[in-house]
Amino acid sequence: MRAVVVGGSLAGVTAVDELRRHGWDGVITLVGDEPHAAYARPPLSKGVLKGTEGADSVALPRLGADVEVLTGIRATGLDVDARLVRVEGDGVIPYDKLVIATGARARTLGEHGLVLRTLDDAVRLRGELARSRSVLVIGGGFLGMEIASVAAELGLDVTVVDVRTPFVTTLGPFLAGLFERAAREHGVRTVVCPDGVSPAPYGARLADGSRLEADLVVTAVGCRPNTEWLQGSGLTLLGGVVVDERCRAGAPDVVAVGDVAALPTGDGRFRRTPHWDAAIGQARAGVTALLHGDAATPYTPQPYFWTEAFGLAVKLAGTLPAAGEPTVLKGSLADRCALLRWDHPDRPVAAALNHRIPVARLRALAA
């Protein structure tokens, strides 16, 4: 018996650990297309990009010697009837159980602009920042603002451009306002261009025809699921691999987890949740379903996020964005150290702003 995990991501490594935890005593093969061993992505836009953490610091714990790890090998196809994963070079890997954890890649805007998604991306971007005096970051979400923060700390002239106010669609207007003020204090300029922006050599063109100039352009505008290798497999691909509430992908003994999986939202739609916490939770739920079927507990999201930028470190529990004004439970917003809660009946959120608190307690506040 062989369980195959395609994707050397956090979700893939968690799936391997979960297989062993559930007593799977057959062969486990992990296939990853990157040349590196599995690593954590959150530090890439923080310590690794800044140069305070080395590339080896992000490595996840090594898998046991009983796991066959194949790095630098790309999956090219899936035959669910023959139970075969096809890999480059016309190779095949048979499976009895399959976990799809091929994640996502950085979304790009044309041919210009660097991206930050992989360890190699982070190392390359760190070198480019060291050679530049100014940087234009296109995208004002978690990743874009973290990159802008590091660049400002390194002494570069930084501009962030987005179709909306940075962070407003991810964190909500209240926290977005805090980060925008902190960014200005660090010398970062933000430009809102509702009609769109296009990267160009050494800058970007705005929809009104004006142009922003910079030595370096970085795009941070989301990610695309790596599903091309699954074309023709019979799996439903709709903005990701469509799965049920137990992460089952619509073929016998196949689950999809992590950034590549599109889960039901309860209103007839499916959505990916490309975040660290979701990758772990889905991998655990998916493997349980893979081994125990309908007896497995459905995946229940417990949203948890964090970001660090411009001297603000915020941890959040609950469904974002947070709506309206929060209640200050502890600390002071004037001191930028506070425990906050939004008591919206449909989507309560708790946040720790430069405030230490266990994750379990923050989730309890949001619940």
Image (cartoon, rainbow, N blue to C red):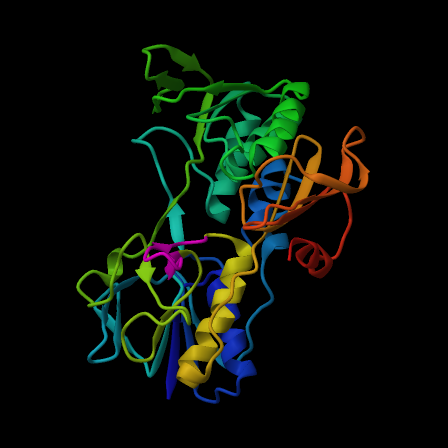
Is residue 109 visible to us here? yes
Q: Position of residue 54 (x, y in %)?
A: 63, 47
Residue 48, position as x, y percentages in the image: 60, 43
Magenta stretch contains residue 264: yes
Residue 336 located left or right of residue 367: right
337 on left or right of 72: right
325 vs 313, nearest the viewer: 325
The quarter in which the C terminus is drawn is bottom right
- The quarter of the image holding the N terminus is bottom left
Q: Position of residue 53 (x, y in %)?
A: 66, 45
Answer yes or no: is residue 10 visible: no
Q: Nearer the viewer, residue 77 or 359?
A: 359
Q: Which residues are magenta?
A: 260-273
In the displayed structure, would residue 34 be above or below residue 310?
below
Q: Residue at x 43, y 37 (%)?
A: 115
Q: Is residue 28 left or right of residue 74?
A: right
Across and down, in percent, residue 166 comes to: 52, 29
Q: Check if residue 118 falls in the magenta segment.
A: no
